[in-house]
């Protein structure tokens, strides 16, 4: 994923009447039991260093997907788990505040609506 931060990006579309993500995500690994989607956690630094980002791997069980498209709840659960892994146990200094999680769809960034 590019390191430059895009000020605005569209959220992931969800099909009406269901909670399935309505686009083909850029899957980095696919097995019969899981799919892995690359994402980026963008953070806001409380110092003058400015925004930073951390790469995330969103691991989604196939049982929570419809083909190659995950249910939104499963994607959000995977994003929460990835953010927790990336920020716990002093891995990330407390000066970095999570801002948003971004993934690619056909090479274009889309927002995963994890934070309000």
Image (cartoon, grey):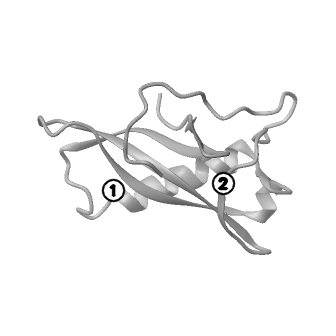
Q: Is the residue 42 above or below the residue 88 in the image?
A: above
Of all residues, the one furthest to the bottom in this rendering is 32
Q: Nearer the viewer, residue 110 or 81?
A: 110
**In the rendering, at what x and y percent does residue 48 appear?**
12, 35
Of all residues, the one furthest to the left in this rendering is 48
**In the rendering, at what x and y percent does residue 90 appear?**
23, 62
Q: Is residue 94 left or right of residue 42?
A: left
Element on which disc 2 rests: loop
Disc nearest the viewer among 1 and 2 = 2
Residue at the spot x=69%, y=50% of the render?
Answer: 25
Q: Is residue 91 left or right of residue 16?
A: left
Q: Residues within 10 Å of mark 1 (few under 14, many from 20)?
A: some
Q: Nearer the viewer, residue 41 or 18?
A: 41
**Residue indicated by mark 2:** 26
Element on which disc 1 rests: helix
Q: Is residue 58 left or right of residue 82?
A: right
**In the rendering, at what x and y percent does residue 108 appear?**
59, 40
**In the rendering, at what x and y percent does residue 7 appear?**
41, 26
**Residue indicated by mark 1:** 87
Q: Is the residue 114 above or below the residue 17 in the image?
A: below
Q: Residues within 10 Å of mark 2 (few under 14, many from 20)?
A: some
Residue at the spot x=27%, y=63% of the render?
Answer: 91
C-alpha separation, residue under disc 1 versus residue under disc 2: 24 Å
Q: Is residue 63 left or right of residue 3?
A: right
Residue at the spot x=52%, y=52% of the render?
Answer: 39
Residue at the spot x=66%, y=35% of the render?
Answer: 12
Please tell me how many numbered marks the rendered image carries: 2
């Amino acid at each position: 994923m590019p390191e430059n931060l895009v000020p605005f990006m569209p959220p992931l579309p969800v099909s009406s009447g269901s909670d399935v993500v309505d686009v083909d995500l850029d899957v980095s690994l696919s097995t019969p039991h899981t799919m892995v989607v690359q994402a980026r956690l963008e953070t806001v630094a409380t110092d003058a260093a400015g925004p930073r980002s951390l790469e995330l791997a969103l691991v989604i069980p196939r049982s929570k997907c419809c083909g190659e498209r995950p249910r939104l709840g499963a994607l959000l659960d995977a994003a929460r788990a990835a953010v927790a892994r990336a920020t716990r146990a002093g891995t990330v200094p407390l000066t970095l505040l999570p801002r948003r999680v971004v993934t690619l769809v056909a090479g274009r960034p889309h927002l995963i609506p994890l934070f309000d």
